[in-house]
Image (cartoon, rainbow, N blue to C red):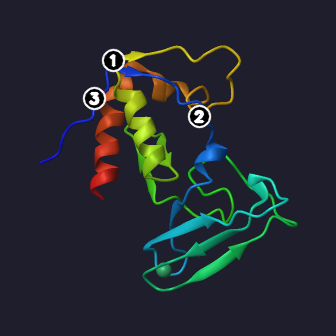
Amino acid sequence: MSVERRPERFRDPLVGLYSLAEQDIDVVCPRCSARAVISAQPHDGLTVLSWPRRLVCPTCTHSAWWESKGNYSSWGGPIDPFFRLPLWLRASCRNGRTLWAFNEAHLTLLEDFVTARLRERTPDGYHQTLVERLPAWLKSAKNRDEVRRVISRMRAA
Ligand SMILES: [Zn+2]
């Protein structure tokens, strides 16, 4: 039995994409197409964005390292910022847009935002939060049902 998540209010947790990427990112394994995981390897003296990242596929045991030296991370699309692999959690909406999330926590944040009856205003001065930067179509009430449907489908997959 599943309990529907339907928070009354949504308060912006004031996290950005960068901090979500400190957690594991689920991607499609480039070798076997199963779910692989990219984890941050915290490193003293480096900023979060420059931490080395480790890709591991539990299905075919493929693994790889990403190092920041000579590499740029790429943000804001349905790929992971480091290896640029397709995200595991991504799906097309009927309007042709792609809904994507780095991981379960990211998906839950989107779901809570989309389903909340009331969205509290983000405090002034926070313009770089994930929620502030969501595209307009995702914030639009007319797409709410479709986005919720797509998120449940992603969870079920
Ligand atoms: Zn694999």
Q: Measure the alpha-carbon separation of dots 2 and 1.
A: 19 Å
Looking at the rendered structure, the kind of residue marked 3 is Arg
Name the residue located 61 percent from the left edge and 52 percent from the top edge.
Answer: 21
- CA neighbours of label 3 inside 10 A, class few (<14), some (14 to 19), many (20+): some
Which of these two is toward me, 10 or 28? Answer: 10
Q: Are marks 2 and 1 in contact (CB under 8 Å)?
A: no
- Residue at figure coordinates x 42%, y 82% from the top left: 59
The alpha-carbon separation of the residues under discs 3 and 2 comes to 20 Å
The residue identified by callout 3 is 6
Instruction: Using the image as rendered, state which of residue 97 and residue 84 is in the foreground.
Output: 84
The image quarter containing residue 25 is: bottom right
Q: Which residue is mark 2?
A: 130
Which callout, 3 or 1, points at the residue further toward the start of the chain? 3
Q: Which residue is mark 1?
A: 117
Q: Is residue 145 left or right of residue 37?
A: left
Q: Residue furthest front?
A: 44
Count of all numbered marks drawn on residues in the image? 3
Please report contact status of discs 3 and 1: CB closer than 8 Å, yes or no. yes
Left or right: where does residue 54 sit relative to residue 137?
right
First along the sequence among labels 2 and 1:
1
Residue found at the very far bottom of the displayed protein: 61
State the image coordinates of residue 47 (x, y, percent, origin top left).
Answer: 80, 53
Task: Say what amino acid the circle numbered 2 marks.
Answer: Leu
Query: Does the numbered disc 2 mark a residue whose Cβ is under 8 Å from ligand 1?
Result: no
Circle 3 SS class: loop
